[in-house]
């Protein structure tokens, strides 16, 4: 399939002012010449009449650009047609390309997959591109763009250079016994320092809260006003509200963006002694959600609040009961009083969970391989025999290769590139 020439609409679905159709592969230039005649020089745009290769019927007048491999986004020859964005025009051009032998419609993500397979990007950059396409908040966009532009790849390249230098020390210790003591001392010190640095990276804020949303759990006793608060924040009736205690039996999740921060606001069952089996299940789930919350919003007596590192005390129903105690946020879901200060407080706490501006956020897969490398480096630092140290360093190099996609990731590729749209 890598030898096929592929094509697809790479811009949004028509109608539009302009649509972009990309062709990539060994027959891209030949196919483009059959539609447009003489092509412009590489990386130069020119207007051409596009005609059907069999009938010579005029299909459109479009801007044509050519990018010769390997200096293209896929590493192959690419031709782009920037045509008028009407449905009929786009359909006619795609049909004309289909009629050319050796061309086929691209699969989702196939352009990016070819860029990966041809060494134009590594796996971390491909993951960043996938996240960039799916980004819905500014913080998601910034973090994804940093990875897509090679932020993690450049860091891993530095780590790989250090691993190679340590491996050279280990191999030298194997070959020259008389220098064992000096080399071993350097190897132990540098391997231990390297392992500590990687463990420090593993302690940084991760990508999952950024991608899936910071989990903000609203908890408290029954009839405290949790569901009313959720509805007031969401601006719609997402949770059932009654005067009957125990109305909320299961948790309700509301995804939001607060000041550019992705948040997953979660309503929970009121915490009390359950009166029936169904409510007991809901309360048990609420307890687990409270324990796993990134930010906990507590409606109830501050003295009864669970211990939590990011705890916000809310004094609900301030329209009925007035201002709450110091340190709490007084809120009325009826009048809207206090909602803005509460949302600002939630957003501030949520930001502390996320990676800072310009910081690289590791996803679960990336963190797993970095943890493998750190463990192997720790073993190298602890090894007495340089042969064992050399093997441990080889395992660390292998972990970095899996991190960047050089080895052992075939099972991930279909799932990853399947997240992309047809023309990406």
Image: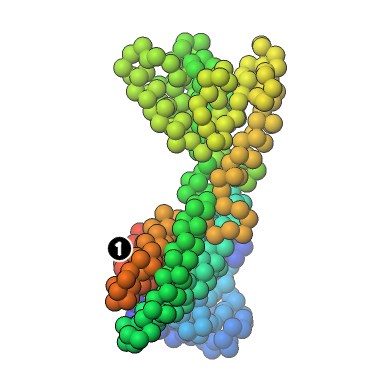
Examine the rendered structure and indicate whether residue 224 appears above or below residue 421. above
Can residue 138 be seen here? yes
Mark 1 lies on a secondary structure that is helix
Instruction: Tell me which residue sits at (50%, 57%) in the image.
Output: 200
Q: Is residue 307 above or below residue 132?
A: above
Marker count (numbered):
1
**x, y percentage for residue 173?**
35, 82
**53 above or below 153?**
below
Q: Quadrant of residue 43?
A: bottom right
- Quadrant where the N terminus lies? bottom left
The front one of 141 and 420 is: 141
x%, y% of residue 301?
Answer: 57, 17
* Nearer to the camera, 70 or 293: 293
| Residue 94 seen in the figure | no
Q: Quadrant of residue 171?
A: bottom left
* Left or right: 378 as drawn, with respect to 159: left
Question: Can you identify the residue that label 1 sits on?
Answer: 411
- The residue at the point 61 percent across, 36 percent down is 346
Q: Is residue 378 left or right of residue 354?
A: left
Rendered residue at 41%/70% (across/down):
188
Tell which of 409 and 113 is nearer to you: 409
Tell me where residue 293 appears, x and y as whole percent.
Answer: 48, 36
Give percent across and percent down for residue 266: 49, 32
């Amino acid at each position: 399939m890598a030898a096929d020439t592929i094509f697809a609409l790479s811009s949004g679905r028509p109608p539009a002012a302009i649509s972009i159709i990309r062709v990539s592969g060994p027959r891209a230039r030949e196919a483009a010449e059959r539609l447009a005649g003489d092509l412009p020089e590489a990386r130069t745009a020119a207007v051409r009449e596009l005609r059907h290769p069999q009938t010579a019927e005029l299909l459109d007048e479009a801007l044509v650009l050519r990018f010769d491999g390997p200096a293209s986004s896929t590493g192959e020859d690419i031709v782009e047609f920037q045509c008028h964005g009407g449905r009929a025009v786009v359909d006619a051009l795609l049909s004309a390309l289909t009629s050319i032998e050796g061309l086929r419609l691209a699969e989702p993500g196939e352009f990016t997959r070819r860029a990966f397979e041809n060494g134009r990007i590594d796996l971390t950059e491909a993951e960043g591109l996938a996240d960039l396409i799916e980004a819905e908040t500014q913080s998601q966009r910034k973090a994804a763009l940093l990875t897509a532009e090679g932020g993690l790849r450049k860091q891993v390249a530095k780590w790989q250079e250090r691993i190679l230098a340590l491996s050279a020390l280990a191999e030298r210790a194997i070959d020259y016994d008389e220098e064992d003591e000096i080399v071993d001392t350097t190897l132990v010190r540098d391997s231990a320092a390297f392992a500590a640095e990687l463990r420090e990276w593993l302690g940084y804020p991760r990508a999952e809260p950024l991608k899936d949303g910071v989990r903000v759990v609203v908890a408290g006793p029954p009839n405290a006003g949790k569901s009313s608060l959720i509805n007031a924040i969401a601006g719609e009736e997402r949770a059932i509200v009654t005067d009957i205690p125990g109305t909320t039996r299961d948790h309700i999740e509301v995804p939001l963006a607060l000041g550019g921060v992705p948040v997953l606001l979660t309503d929970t069952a009121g915490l009390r002694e359950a009166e029936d089996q169904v409510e007991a299940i809901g309360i048990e789930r609420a307890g687990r959600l409270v324990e796993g919350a990134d930010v906990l919003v507590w409606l109830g007596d501050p003295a009864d609040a669970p211990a939590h590192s990011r705890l916000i005390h809310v004094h609900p129903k301030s329209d009925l009961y007035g201002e709450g105690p110091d340190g709490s946020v007084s809120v009325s879901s009826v009048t809207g009083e206090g909602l803005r200060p509460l949302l600002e407080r939630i957003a501030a706490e949520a930001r502390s969970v996320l990676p800072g501006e310009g910081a690289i956020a590791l996803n679960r897969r990336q963190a797993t391989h970095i943890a493998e490398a750190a463990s192997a480096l720790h073993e190298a630092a602890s090894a007495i025999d340089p042969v064992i140290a050399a093997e441990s360093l080889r395992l660390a190099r292998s972990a970095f290769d899996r991190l960047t996609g050089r080895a052992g990731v075939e099972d991930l590729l279909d799932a990853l590139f399947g997240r992309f749209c047809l023309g990406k």
